[in-house]
Amino acid sequence: MKAKEHIKKIAGSRWTKPLALAVTAAVIFSWLYTHGISPVWTAVAIVCFRGIFRFLYRAACLLVALAILLCILSLLVF
């Protein structure tokens, strides 16, 4: 079997997305825990203040897009 077939088989699995989400959540909770924030309080904050996290996510996306745009423009100018 070629690598492409293996990748398609793994990507087509119904467990791929939940597993990726669980790994991402574990990494984020671990990072927050090492910085002194309890995973329980983080989960409570996410559940109770969803609007704030949506706003922060949109603001972060906007800032990243702006940074990429500025990098591209600076490469074109210089």
Image: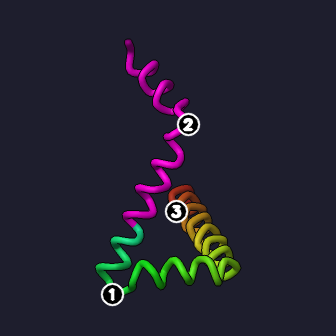
Viewport quadrant of the N terminus: top left
- State the image quarter where residue 70 is shown: bottom right
Residue beneath label 1, please? 36
- Location of residue 56 in the rendering, given as x and y in whole percent from the top left corner: 61, 78
Cα–Cα span, label 1 and label 3: 34 Å
Does the magenta segment cover residue 7?
yes
Q: Nearer the viewer, residue 8 or 17?
A: 17
Image mark for residue 21: none
* Residue under the image location 44 percent in, 59 percent down: 24
- State the image quarter where residue 26 is shown: bottom left
Residue beneath label 3, please? 71
Density class for disc 3 (Cα within 10 Å; few <14, some 14-19, many ≥20) is few
Question: Taken as a whole, is the magenta stretch helix, strand or loop?
Answer: helix
Point out the frontmost of discs 1 and 3.
Answer: 1
Q: Which amino acid type is shown beneath numbered disc 3?
A: Cys
The residue sitting at the top extreme is 1
Q: Earlier in the sequence, mark 2 or mark 3?
A: 2
* Residue under the image location 65 percent in, 83 percent down: 49
Q: Contact, CB < 8 Å: mark 1 with mark 3?
A: no
Point out the frontmost of discs 2 and 3.
Answer: 2
Q: Is residue 3 left or right of residue 73?
A: left
- State the image quarter where residue 35 is shown: bottom left
The residue sitting at the left extreme is 34
Q: Nearer the viewer, residue 52 or 14?
A: 14
